[in-house]
Image: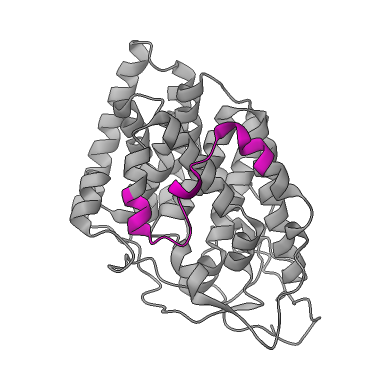
Amino acid sequence: MTELSLSNADIQPSPYSCSGKHDKPNWPEVRAPDRKPDPDIDLDEQTYSNLYPTSERIRLSADAKHFFAISSGASLVDPGIQVALADSGNDILIADYCEAASEDCLAALQKTGAAAFAFLKLCVYAGLMRESQFGHLVAQTIQFRVIGFYRDHATSRRPRGVYGSRMTSTSAHRYVDLGSIIGVVCASLATGESMTAADHHATVRTTALINDLVDFRGDTWRGQRENVVLRGVRGCLCSYLDGMVSDCIKGAATLTSRGKIFALNIMSFCNWMMMSSGHKVYELLRGTRAIDSDPPCCYLSQENGVYEDLLVALEVYGTLGQDGPDLAMKRKDLQLLYAVYRNESEGHIKWLADAVRLMLHPKTLRRLVDVVHYQWVGELGDAGYCA
């Protein structure tokens, strides 16, 4: 509660770039694409809904369910249980969309979420799920019902641009906001493995960095305070973002090497970032352009070997090579191809491992987060879109 209520407190001075301190930031206004599906890049509604159905039919929430929650099981969990696990997180979606979704959508989320919990409780009675796994899902839902609905969505009151605010740790806020326990439970069912509280803390921190580095430009433009990378900004922005990129890749490498339950959580987050229309990776990589008069500075994360450690940790999971995902592919092509591989447990986990290789490449992350040396030249659209 303290972390949420004080998230806009302790506003930090404007950061500076590698060129030194100035009276005001010496980089272009931070801009990004909106979250609205683009018919040239995204699947049409009918095709998408046939491949990735949900009761509420909200594209952004369907993305989260199919590309994160369900993919966390890597096709090793009963499909009905996987869908129920995804729907058990509907309180998170209600908290996210309560100001934008229609009454019918909110009612569908409530009813489907309740039905999911009833079904999962039967799974506990049948011995298909442990009581502790079910209990974690219940605890997360209670947390969102108490806290999630009352988060501050008043972005109009927040300063524009890049600035830090109160930060006690990079994971404290995301314990409330990220909903990662769904992926943990699904991966636990798939592998038979479990996590300690310390394991979960490390997983939350790294997955929060994956999510918030990808969303850094967009959340800065929209004035979102949920982004822990944005809230943690201090001092030189170039070295700060470089450090966050390095920490993210290093954390992913360490966790992936520890076991399959950790690897599946890293993989599913990267898959969600790559495949979701809300995260706009395709547009971000093409709508940013290096500033000719201010060439990119050196990012140590590209040279310190952490990505090579990640590649070693991923070797055991294989790769699809040229037959797999590619960041040059439009989302609709990725989603059509993923619909094939997600039905094959061996092909699915290779796809997920490739998603990590692509999304956590230091050059990819740099292009996504470097608002100092890469300016936005693409289309903007509706900043407030979230349906």
Considering every residue shown, the one lying at the far front of the view is 322
| 368 on left or right of 312 | left
**Image coords of residue 6 (percent x, y):** 60, 57
At x 68%, y 60%, the residue is: 232
Q: Nearer the viewer, residue 321 or 232?
A: 321
User: Residue drawn at (40%, 42%), measured in percent from left and top?
Assistant: 145
| Vertical order, 221 against 363 (above or below) | below
Q: Is residue 223 visible?
A: no
Q: Which of the 4 image quarters holds residue 279?
A: bottom left
| Quadrant of the frame with the C terminus | bottom left
Residue 323 position within the rendered picture, expressed as x and y whole percent measured from the top left: 43, 47
Q: Nearer the viewer, residue 155 or 161?
A: 161
Which is nearer the eye, 353 or 247?
A: 353
Asked if residue 309 lies left or right of residue 128, the reply is right
Magenta stretch containing residue 312, yes or no?
Answer: yes
Colouring style: one colour
Identified at 75% across, 77% down, the residue is 16
Q: Locate residue 346: give its quadrant.
A: top left
Is 352 situated above or below 274? Answer: above
Determine whether, in the image, residue 139 is placed left or right of residue 80.
right
* Residue 285, x across and y down, in percent: 51, 68
Magenta extent: 311-336
Majority secondary structure in the magenta region: helix
Where is residue 158? Give x, y as percent: 54, 72
Q: Which quadrant of the figure has residue 344?
A: top left
Q: Is residue 38 visible?
A: yes
Residue 170 higher or lower than 254, as above or below: below
Q: Is residue 278 magenta?
A: no
- Front in this rendered view, residue 351 or 371: 351
